[in-house]
């Protein structure tokens, strides 16, 4: 019997639902339209029905070199055959090699601690900042995403009804991300707007702040860039009030430059977290920073030493993938970063021209290989700006129309798009052709 295209996906979802709540292992798997991917190669994805897509989602951005990048995969296969294993005790040569590569090539890093996921890394960064400062309060940014653990799972995607009118200077109401957290009752988390130095000062005057954690470019809600002087202003406020400045570069790290956005901005945080593109899709994350802070991980006084543990921390597969990725970027950095910058420029100009031809009010925001469009008259300065002015419904319709045409922008409004080193100028031209068709379809329907 021949299985129809529709029934193949339906059968998979039904099978998964029998064993996994909702049929998925993460709510990120729940998208509309539902798609089950079965293969990724370079800049492309294939679904269960054999349809090919040009991929700009990149699994929430780790695939900077493209899906299944051969040099990284081959290094992983080699280490699996070598006899290396997960030892669980004692330092390893691979961990030392990775730490050396990171600390000798990234100015923000004196020492590092290996983790498995971005959420683990940001959790450790917060715990470490509290151990160092002896304080409990910390500042987060409205619309920023810094992990799925209780301490940071708040104020990501809210409505104006949730958060109320713009607050500046001041802090927003705390809004947990979903049920089951204790964040609303601990009174230690203070959400403020991005690009708002006076709100940082406002919180610091009222609470003993251990740290502020922020993406240096907000990429959970597209691409929201820091205003001139904003990151330097955070550095000054951290020094003035004695809190630690934490850059969450899980998304921006390695995609923007080998040293992340801190390298481009010239602003050094006290602690920094990396993930995603550091190993081109293999699960690893890094907490690093100034030696005097990182040394608290092994502080001789147990009362000052934060607890750090993880069976799979430093797994040889992920560590090898990270080593190979960094070595590749060190050897090919100018070509790789120049290539994605040029493709990003072509995409930005093309999108801008399409919206102009159709008389649509829109802006294009880009940082290197990361780009986003906003259906508003200027690039946003913070999440509140987006909530007030962006057309979320049309954004979602446009993304779904692109998926129909074989272009995969994840169907979640405002989410950034990521160009990889595997994309070509032909991919950009094809994407822009499809984008124009999608725009014509969506706006003709209104």
Image (tube, rainbow, N blue to C red):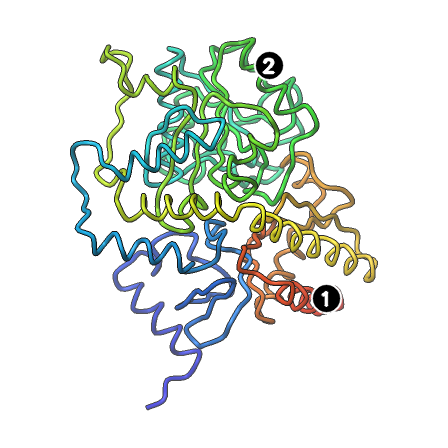
Nearer the observer, disc 2 or disc 1?
2
Q: How many numbered circles are shown?
A: 2
Q: Which residue is mark 2?
A: 236
Q: Which mark is residue 417?
A: none
Secondary element at tag 1: helix
Looking at the picture, how far across and down is residue 152, in whole percent?
Answer: 43, 31
Image quarter of residue 425: bottom right
Q: Is residue 326 left or right of residue 418?
A: left
Q: Which is nearer the N-term, disc 2 or disc 1?
A: 2
Camera-side residue: 403 or 14? 403
Q: Are circles 2 and 1 on residues that touch, CB within 8 Å?
A: no
Looking at the picture, how far across and down is residue 335, in whole percent?
Answer: 58, 50
Q: What's the CA distance linking mark 2 and mark 1?
A: 45 Å
Q: Residue at x 21, y 32 (%)?
A: 91
Camera-side residue: 239 or 148? 239
Looking at the picture, how far across and down is residue 392, in whole percent?
Answer: 64, 51
Q: Residue at x 54, y 15 (%)?
A: 238
Secondary element at tag 2: helix
Looking at the picture, how far across and down is residue 178, in whole percent?
Answer: 42, 40
Q: Which residue is mark 1?
A: 436
- Label 1: few (<14), some (14–19) or many (≥20) C-alpha neighbours in 10 Å: some
């Amino acid at each position: 019997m021949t299985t129809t295209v529709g029934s193949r996906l339906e059968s998979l979802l039904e099978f998964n639902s029998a064993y996994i709540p909702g049929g998925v292992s993460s709510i990120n798997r729940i998208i509309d339209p539902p798609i089950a991917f079965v293969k990724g190669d370079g800049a492309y994805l294939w679904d269960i029905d054999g349809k090919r897509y040009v991929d700009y989602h990149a699994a929430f951005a780790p695939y900077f070199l493209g899906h299944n990048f051969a040099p990284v995969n081959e290094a992983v296969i080699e280490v699996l055959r070598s006899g290396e294993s997960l030892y669980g005790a004692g330092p390893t040569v691979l961990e030392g090699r990775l730490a050396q590569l990171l600390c000798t090539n990234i100015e923000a890093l004196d020492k590092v601690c290996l983790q498995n996921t971005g959420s683990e890394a940001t959790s450790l960064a917060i715990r470490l900042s509290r151990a160092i400062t002896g304080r409990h309060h910390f500042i987060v940014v409205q619309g920023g995403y810094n992990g799925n653990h209780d301490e940071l799972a708040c104020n990501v995607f809210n409505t104006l009804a949730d958060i109320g009118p713009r607050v500046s200077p001041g802090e927003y109401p705390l809004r947990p991300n979903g049920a089951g957290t204790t964040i609303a009752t601990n009174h230690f988390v203070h959400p403020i707007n991005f690009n708002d130095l006076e709100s940082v000062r406002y919180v610091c005057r009222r609470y003993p702040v251990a740290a502020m954690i922020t993406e240096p470019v907000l990429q959970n809600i597209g691409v929201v860039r820091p205003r001139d002087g904003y990151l330097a202003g955070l550095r000054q406020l951290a020094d003035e009030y004695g809190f630690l400045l934490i850059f969450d570069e899980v998304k921006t790290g390695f995609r923007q430059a080998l040293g992340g956005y801190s390298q481009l901005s010239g602003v050094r945080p006290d602690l920094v977290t990396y993930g995603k593109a550091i190993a081109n899709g293999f699960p690893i994350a890094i907490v690093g920073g100034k030696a005097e802070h990182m040394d608290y991980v092994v502080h001789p006084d147990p009362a000052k030493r934060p607890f750090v543990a993880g069976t799979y921390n430093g797994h040889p597969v992920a560590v090898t993938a990270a080593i190979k990725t960094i070595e590749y970027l060190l050897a090919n950095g100018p070509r790789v970063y120049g290539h994605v910058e040029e493709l990003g420029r072509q995409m930005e100009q093309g999108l801008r021209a399409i919206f102009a031809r159709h008389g649509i009010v829109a802006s294009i925001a880009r940082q290197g290989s990361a780009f986003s469009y906003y259906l508003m008259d200027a690039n946003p300065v913070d999440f509140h700006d987006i909530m007030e002015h962006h057309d979320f419904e049309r954004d979602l319709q446009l993304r779904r129309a692109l998926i129909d045409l074989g272009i995969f922008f994840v169907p979640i409004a405002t989410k950034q798009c990521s160009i990889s080193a595997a994309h070509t100028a032909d991919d950009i031209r094809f994407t822009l052709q499809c984008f124009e068709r999608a725009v014509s379809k969506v706006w003709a329907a209104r």
